[in-house]
Structure formats: C-alpha cells, structure tokens
Image (cartoon, rainbow, N blue to C red):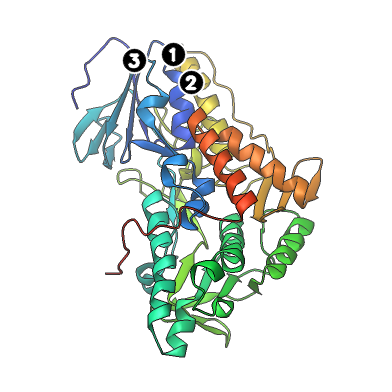
Amino acid sequence: MNIKKTSFPRIVIVGGGFAGVALAKKLSKQDLQVVLLDKNNYHTFQPLLYQVSTGGLEPDSIAYPIRKILKDFPNFHFRLADVEEIDPIKNKVITNIGKLKFDYLVVASGSETNYFGNTNIEKYSMAMKTIPQSLNLRSLILENFEDALLTSDLNERNALMNFVIVGGGPTGVELAGALAEIKKGILPKDYPDLDTRLAQIHVVQSGDNILKGMSAKASQKAEDFLEKLGVNVWKNVRVVNYDGKTVTTNTDITFETATLIWAAGVKGANIKGLDAEKFITRGNRLLVNEFNQVREFNHIFAIGDVACMTSEEYPNGLPMMAQPAIQQGDQLGDNMLRLIEERPMKPFVYTDKGTMATIGRNKAVVDLKRFKFQGVFAWYVWMFVHLFFLIGFRNRMVVFVNWVYNYVRFDREARLIIRPFKRR
C-alpha cells in the first residue's frame, strides 16, 4: 500500500463512517501512524439518504471526501480499499489492494441491510443504505411514473404507482412522508395526463407501533401525521415474500407493487476473520467490552454499528445510530492513548442525547431526555441538528438553501434520472 514504516505505533481503522471518522480525527494529531481504509473515498451522512432517494438533495451535498476531512494531519493515511479478511494472529488486514500490518486495529465497518435470510426479498426489493442505492431508488421511482404513462393496463399502472415500505423506523417513516409530499405537490404538475391520485404509499410494520424506539406519544403523533398525508400504515403485519410483483404477508393482506423498499432492519457489516461464533452476537455484531475491545483481544477494537456493547439498560447492545458511534470513536481515541502509555482505560458510558424523526413539511417528533415535543418546533429542531452534524461548510449551506427553496416553492429540483436503474 506504499505506507512507510515509522517508529510510531500503527493504528488501522476499517470504515469511514461516523465512528471511524470521529476516531481518526481524535488520533491524527498524536504521535501515531493512523491508516483509514474504506471502499469509498467519501463519508456519507446517512440520515439524509432518503432525501436523495426522493429528489430533495443531490448526493454530493450529503457526502464529504475523507481525505479532505483529515488533510492537515501528516501522520494520517487513507487508502481506497475493500477489506476482505482480518488475520488477528499475524496482525494483518487483507484487502483487494494488498496486505497491511497493524499494531492496533479498529473495526468501524458499520452496518448493512438485514433481509433475515429471505432471498426473494433481497433479490427484488430496494435498499437504501448507501448513496448508489439511493440513486437507484430515485431513478426507479421516476421511471415507474414514466412507465405508468405508457401502459393501458390499469392493474399494471396501479402497481407502478404503489410503493410499499417495509419497516416503521425513522428511515421508513421519513421516506413515506417524503413520498407523500411528492404525490401531493409535485406529481400532479409533472404528470398532468396521469391520475396520480391513484398512487398509494404503504408502511408495513411487524410490531404494534411505528418508531418503536421512541415514546408512545411520538409514535402515535407520527402515525397521525402519516395518515393525514394519505399514507396507509399497517401494523402487526409482517412481509414474508415478494416476487417482484406481489407482496405477501403473514395475514391475508397482499400488495401489488413494482417497488418494495426494505427498511426493516440492519445487521453488523462484519469481516471474515472475526466472524467466529465466539466473537459474534445478535445482529451479526462483534462482542466488545466496556473499552470497545473485541472479546479475547487487547489490540483489536470495534466501534459503531458493528460493535455490540451490552449493559443493563441496553441488553442487546447500544442502538445502531450516529450518536453512539460518534461517542465511541471520540472516547476510544483517548483510551488508545492511555493503552499505549500503559495507563488504565476509562469504560465507555453512552449519553443518550435524544431521538427524532421528520414526517414531512412542518411535521416532526423529538424525544429528548427531559422534553418531548411534536409538530413545527420539532421540525425546526430536526433541521438544526442535521445541519449541525453535516461535515463541511459547503454541504451545510447547500442543504440549507435546498431546504429553503423546497419549502418556499414546494418543489424538489433533483428529480433526475441520471443513470437509469434496471433490475437484473
């Protein structure tokens, strides 16, 4: 990889998500050699992927070059690489561009879509975990309406204009709200010769409420917001199969749709070499102790979505969200310095800063530790928080201007089919 050897300890970080970037920023100012490996050369702000999928934002406004984030640190190295295997005995990572030795390894590979073993759903549904997947979904949504104009088969036309979102978490709820606003304010203008009132948006949730991790009031209010927007919310219904045309469930309810969007779960994006049963727990996550050390290793760590740190409050591990990842990356930076200097490390304690979700224009729900509120004020809080955590001044300005423009004009300028999506 053309990374010179130095007298400094080499720390290899796998993954440039929230956790990996937070750790790299913390360590890169120290007398250490920090190497970050990722299969993309950019960091993705995943909470806004749904806005790329629905034409509200262009992808470059929620992505930021990793090299630019850490450009001022002389001991930092980035390599565009897909990590294929970890050899914890020889202290090597094996990638598609070569092998690299490490003194300390941090796995921050994040998460990936969990289809729970359903191969048909994996084959025919649409995921939304990456920017390419979001662009595929954007193209497919727009192509569906173009195809609906061309068919004289009423059932086919309805299927092209029906959207089934599986999963009532923040991703599913926010995507449903955005699609509902497109149906209301944009489709009638873009397709005046198509009866877009026939378009249907369904959210299918296997449990008895949406936004399960939030308060009962937030869940109910979000459901009310969705229903006012014309979204059909199906609770206690589990999708069991999809053949590209028909969605079947564990009840007698079926849906005819050309677009099934899978937002029903994620699992740890684990790497070969640390995938033995003794390292892995529920959700394909790596078991770590209170210092984020992977079980049985003192020099291998895991942070973010791929790490499972259990406690009395979180028996199944910390939530797979941005805040735990950022906090773990930040503290691990301090702990690794303590470890190298042979000082005792500090156990990680998660500070829950709240949860929020937006359901469209002037509609959001926010659960903080002491306060819970919904509606317009919650919507402003949601926007401020997301702008604050975006990386890069330009990205913040571009997103802010787009939001203001979309709000004033009730429009989404990025509804472009840049690269047509075709199912294999």
Position above or below: 253 against 374:
below
Residue, x 29% and y 38% (percent of image)?
86
Q: Is residue 61 left or right of residue 389?
A: left
Q: Is residue 80 above or below residue 375?
A: above
**Residue 405 at what x, y percent from top left?**
58, 46
- How many C-alpha atoms fall within 10 Å of the one at disc 2: few (<14), some, or many (≥20)? some
> Quick check: marks 3 and 2 in contact, CB under 8 Å?
no
Query: Which residue has dot 2 on it?
Result: 26
Secondary structure at numbered mark 1: loop
Please tell me which residue lies in front, 54 or 404: 404
> In what quadrant of the picture does the C terminus appear?
bottom left
Q: Which residue is mark 1?
A: 29
Q: Which amino acid type corresponds to the residue marked 1 in the rendered image?
A: Lys
Task: State the mark number for residue 75.
Answer: 3
Q: CA distance from mark 2 to mark 1?
A: 7 Å
Front residue of this view, candidates 322 and 389: 389
* Residue 102 point in image, percent of width and height: 29, 25
Pick the front one: 42 or 32: 42
The CA span between labels 3 and 2 is 12 Å
Q: 66 above or below 72?
A: below
Residue 380 visible within the image:
yes
Amino acid type shown at disc 3: Asn
413 horizontally vs 219: left or right: left
For label 2, the SS is: helix
- Whether the residues at callouts 2 and 1 have beta carbons within 8 Å, the answer is yes
Closer to the N terminus: mark 3 or mark 1? 1
